[in-house]
Image (cartoon, rainbow, N blue to C red):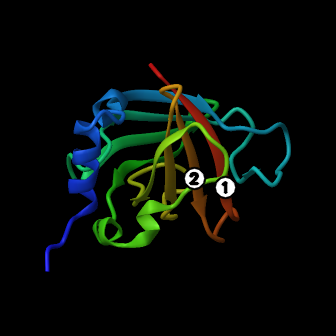
Amino acid sequence: MRTVTLGTLLLSFAGSGCTDLEEYQGDYEGTVVGTDGDSFIRRGFPAGTVLEIAGFDPPPTGESVGRVVARHGGEALLEGDLRLIAPLEHDPLSQYEFPGGGRIRNYIFAMTPTGGTVADREPMFFVSLMEDENLEVRVIAGSGEPGDLFGLFILEPR
């Protein structure tokens, strides 16, 4: 029985006229969505928090996908590398979709922060490659101090 990996499928789609993932390589920056006070789209990230991804390199090109820093008022809240979750490449969860259009591809990444005020958390990053060349990023970490983290960020290329 022949096994086809998600990476092989992505490469074959890229070669058949679909969007080339290399177009999304680079540096991105954006601000958390939402106004003052926690809401259903932002919790634990103060209004105005900026998320940066340096060296974003979407799969299947390597294990490290990019360096992330979330800052508010110059203070780092989260710092670390986005990591592939290898077993997801062979699981239907890697093919999750959001309702609505505009998404080229969705990914789920892990991060073990190496710095920042919430460095004791291990957030998950849900990243969507958008047709407009932006990234839509959801950062999620369960309860802990200072509480749940949930933020939706729209990142533009720098």
Q: How crowded is mark 1: few (under 14 residues within 10 Å), some or many (20 or more)?
A: many
From the top left corner, tell me how far across and down residue 86 is, in percent.
Answer: 28, 66
Q: Nearer the viewer, residue 50 or 146?
A: 50
Comparing 38 with 100, the one in front is: 100
Q: Residue furthest top?
A: 158
Kind of residue indicated by mark 2: Val
Question: Dot 2: few (<14), some (14–19), or many (≥20) neighbours within 10 Å?
Answer: many
- Can you say which quadrant of the picture contains the N terminus? bottom left
Q: Residue at x 80, y 55 (%)?
A: 40
Residue 71 is situated, as x and y percent measured from the top left of the image, at 56, 36
Element assignment for label 2: strand
Looking at the image, residue 149 lies above or below residue 2 = above
Q: In this view, does 152 lie to the left or right of 97?
A: right
The residue labelled by disc 1 is 150
**Quadrant in which the C terminus appears:** top left
Query: Quick check: marks 1 and 2 in contact, CB under 8 Å?
Result: yes
Q: In the rendering, which numbered label is found on residue 139?
A: 2
Quarter assignment of residue 20: top left
**Residue 129 relative to residue 21: left or right:** right
* Percent position of residue 25, x then y: 32, 31
Viewer-side residue, 44 vs 42: 42
Q: Which amino acid does label 1 sit on?
A: Phe
Quarter assignment of residue 58:
top left
> In what element is the residue under mark 1?
strand
Residue 100 image label: none
- Cα separation, mark 1 vs mark 2, equals 5 Å
Residue 31 location in percent, x, y? 64, 32
- At x 48%, y 64%, the residue is 122
Q: Earlier in the sequence, mark 1 or mark 2?
A: 2
Q: In this view, does 117 lie above or below 88?
A: above
